[in-house]
Amino acid sequence: MKIRQGFISNSSSSSFVVKYRWDWLDLHANKVAAAGEQLSLQPDPLTPQQVEALLKYKFWFSKERHPSHLEVFHNEDYPLEVKEEEAEYLVYQQACNEDDTIAFLLGHKIGFKAACHYNHYSVFYCPENDQVVRIDNPGIMHETYGGIDNTIANTRGTKIYTREQWLEENRYNPDGTEAEEDIIYSDDNEITGEGNEVH
């Protein structure tokens, strides 16, 4: 458990998109794949147990496929939340601690796309090949930090992990729960214990 004391600011927004059912792009790609040979799509991208876990975590039904659009591209004509029968995705937004949601999804082996920390970086997980890809978005980082030196200093590029590597490096158990030892933040910003890199 992360313990924060005193004034610590880490208010960063992140958005997650999980495929609930195959969308028109999947179906189109399926029709034209392999020179006309149809690939077999699984009946559903998620198992009933995965859907139950996502709903319990407070994901909701949506048609929005882009995590970076969740905060800006929705209105009365294009609502963010829709009825289950209209949905192609399950989505989630949060104010901070995106690593907890990433770990939850990885722990349940659920594929996802995420725009993290004000869209400063994106994270993708593909269960089929067990790859977690983290990609920095330097243009958006440059808007925030200003100056090319600051942008370069804060950019880590692209990194590819297996599911287990990401969980281990970020101090989570294989099931996505937090490891016993974690970061403890004190009011003088000293860090005790082993844990994650602090941004």
Image (cartoon, grey):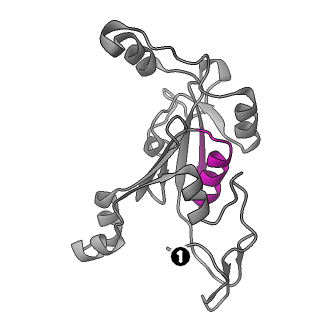
Question: Callout 1 environment at 10 Å: few (<14), some (14 to 19), or many (20+)?
Answer: few
Q: Where is residue 167 in the image (x, y as percent from the top left)?
A: 60, 58
Task: Residue at 33%, 14% (x, y): give it.
Answer: 34
Amino acid type of the residue that numbered disc 1 sits on in the rendered structure = Val
Could you say whether the residue bearing mark 1 is in a helix, strand or loop? loop
Q: Is residue 127 above or below residue 149?
A: above
Q: Position of residue 148 (x, y in %)?
A: 22, 72
Q: Is residue 136 above or below residue 68?
A: below
Q: Where is residue 54 in the image (x, y as percent from the top left)?
A: 70, 39
Nearer to us in this view, 27 or 36: 36
In the figure, residue 182 lies in which quadrant? bottom right
Magenta-highlighted residues: 91-110
Q: Name the residue under label 1.
A: 198
Task: Residue at 42%, 56% (x, y): give it.
Answer: 121
Residue 17, magenta (yes or no): no
- Tell which residue pokes out farthest to the bottom in this image: 188
Question: Which quadrant is home to the N terminus?
Answer: bottom right
Q: Is residue 115 left or right of residue 48?
A: left
Nearer to us in this view, 177 or 21: 177
In the figure, residue 62 lies in which quadrant? top right
Q: In this view, does 179 lie to the left or right of 81?
A: right
Tell me if residue 95 can be seen: no
Q: In this view, does 177 lie above or below 85?
A: below
